[in-house]
Image (tube, helix red, strand yellow):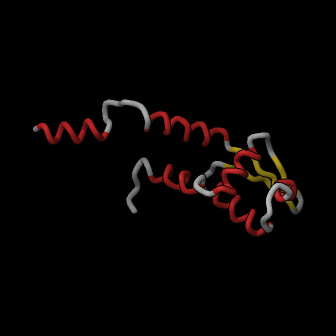
């Protein structure tokens, strides 16, 4: 797969396309939480939660820190803000929009 400005964002969209991962992001919106506490809100096993957390951490939406035997997770605000900016960029008119570039080529 080629590296485009969209590649990193596609990974984030895929991470957020799962119901449990959306719930995790919602839970984390209240602040840092231990995985042991997060498990109380789900009907899933610890390995399944770990998988979901790995997906969210791999796309850098979530930050994890180890304390003893437990992981504590929080939202990576910088990455979330960057993603919000991307959504705004994607959904607003811009000079280099693909529709304008494509139309310009067809008009020649």
**Which residue reaches farthest right?**
68
Instruction: Quadrant for the N terminus, please.
Output: bottom left
Quarter of the rendering containing residue 36: bottom right
The quadrant in which residue 100 appears is: top left
Residue visible at 67% across and 43% down? 76
Which percent across, then down, holds residue 66?
A: 82, 56
Q: Is residue 90 positioned above or below 72 on the image?
A: above
Q: Is residue 39 left or right of residue 102?
A: right
Residue 92 on image: x %, y %: 41, 31
Nearest the eye: 46 or 65: 46
Kindly give the residue lying farthest to the left in the view shown.
108
**Residue 64 position within the rendered picture, expressed as x and y whole percent measured from the top left:** 75, 53
Front in this rendered view, residue 15 or 65: 15
Quadrant of image for the C terminus? top left
Q: Position of residue 7 (x, y in %)?
A: 45, 53
Residue that appears at 70% across and 58% down? 53
Q: Is residue 81 above or below residue 17?
A: above
The residue at 38%/59% (across/down) is 2
Q: Nearer the viewer, residue 8 or 106?
A: 106
């Amino acid at each position: 797969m080629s590296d485009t400005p969209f590649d990193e964002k596609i990974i984030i969209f895929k991470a957020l396309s799962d119901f449990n991962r959306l719930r995790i992001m919602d839970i984390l919106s209240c602040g840092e939480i231990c995985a042991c506490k997060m498990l109380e809100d789900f009907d899933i096993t610890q390995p399944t939660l770990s998988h979901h957390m790995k997906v969210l951490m791999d796309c850098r939406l979530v930050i994890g820190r180890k304390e003893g035997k437990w992981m504590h997770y929080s939202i990576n605000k910088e990455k979330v803000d960057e993603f919000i900016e991307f959504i705004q960029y994607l959904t607003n008119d811009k000079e280099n929009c693909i529709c304008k570039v494509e139309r310009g080529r067809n008009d020649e």
